[in-house]
Amino acid sequence: MNQAKNKISANLYSKRDTWQFCLRYYDDLGSRRQKWVDTGLPVRGNKKKAAKMEEAVLLEWTPRLIPFDQIESVAADVVDKLVTKPQAQHPISTDDYKKTLFADYMLTWLEGAKSSLQISTYSEYLRVVKNVIYPYFEKTNIYLEDIKPADIKKFYDYLLKTKSANTVLKYHANIHRALETAVEDDDTKLEFNPARKVKLPKKIKFVSEIYSKDDLMKLFEVIKNDYLFTLVLVDATYGLRRSELLGLKWSAIDFQRKTLTIKAAAVHCKVDGKLLTVVKPLLKTKSSYRTFPLTPEIEAVLLAEKDKQKQNHKKYRSQYDKKHNDFVFVNDLGELRKPNTVSQHFTRNILQRYDLKRIRFHDLRHTCATLLLDGGVSLKDIQHYLGHSQLATTADIYTHRDYTHQQRTTEIAGQIIRDVQ
């Protein structure tokens, strides 16, 4: 067994409200293993105290996990305390012990960043790090302090054999952010971020498909008795993101003042191995949080939807899911509509079945923008209408002047939809 595989490392994580050490090592067959050791210390206010327990944890668990005559990468002062067994035949490298494998650091960084990330963002980062980045670099045995731009570039070249340039750029964002944290961390010896010097593939600009007025007319005709009708009508009128559409709540709709406010998003992600729909507030930019006037058509379909939900509540009684009573788009049992399910139903059961022009559900948003532009609305007003972040630094979207623009733009959008119904 080589020196790298005799190494046992201890990394501290907050897990289940306590500080725990994750011990990583190789078993007798050379397979990568890990052992979690709970310090019993609550997370809040005990990080330094927990960190001081590392030596004791290694002292207790090293002889249990690795045969003594195979230990080559454990700190000398710990080895000296491992009862009265003969010392290892090979010299112990304290420098190697202090170093952290880059693959392990990516997991450590992600765990540390977890509290500052929204659950959907953390879920995606975890998928990328755990399933792609970690497995690749775990085989290289490259230490964090030793990683070079060439090592990262080699990884990207490997990815480009099966993945798009845009996907690689997303992975790069994870690595770059992790290494920036490492540079700022006094406990690492990384003096600069090598990801900064990696030549990146060029981003491929995606050209979306859009619907014309005639295309929309055909679509509305085939979905008039489908649950998608209300979703598509609202989306085509206001140009919402799918997550904004499915995160719409009744409390955000004022039928007296005739307004509809976008202030939440519903996203699909995997949490603890389970696929969940998570609703989150729109916190990233002010431009995403916006208010529209209700058109008469939208008001009518929403009121019909609200009445349908009341009927289903009475019909299914105890079977009805009351947790999502405030959400506009739920199924007959009151369960929140899942983003992926909506998109799949739109593509497979509607577009393919009725041989309509193939577009993504998200392209309804681009369709709205294009029709507004054709209707004479300025590009700046359209960006504001769609909640593009570029306008966040140039205009306060909550001023009376901006709301007037919203009202004028909504009237044009509403008239376009009336023409195709």
Image (tube, rainbow, N blue to C red):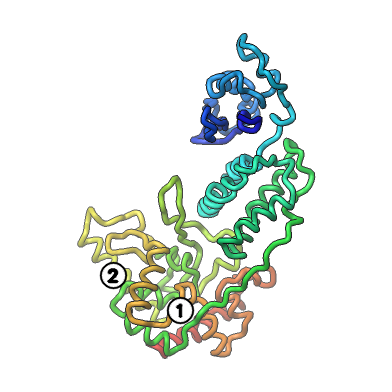
In this rendering, the answer to whether 200 lies above or below 119 is below
Q: Residue at (73%, 26%) from the top-left corner?
A: 94
The secondary element bearing badge 2 is classed as helix
Q: At which x and y percent is residue 27?
A: 53, 29
- The 10 Å Cα crowd at callout 2, few under 14, some 14 to 19, many 20 or more, is few
Q: Is residue 360 visible?
A: yes
Q: At which x and y percent is residue 404?
A: 57, 80
The secondary element bearing badge 1 is classed as helix
Residue sitting nearer the eye, 221 or 148:
148
Pointer 1 residue: 236
**What kind of residue is marked 1?**
Ala
368 left or right, relative to 309 = right
Q: Residue at (40%, 65%) from the top-left corner?
A: 250
- Asked which quadrant contains residue 317, the reply is bottom left
In this rendering, the answer to whether 224 lies above or below 118 is below
Pointer 2 residue: 307
Q: Residue at (66%, 48%) from the top-left corner?
A: 178
313 left or right, relative to 268 = left
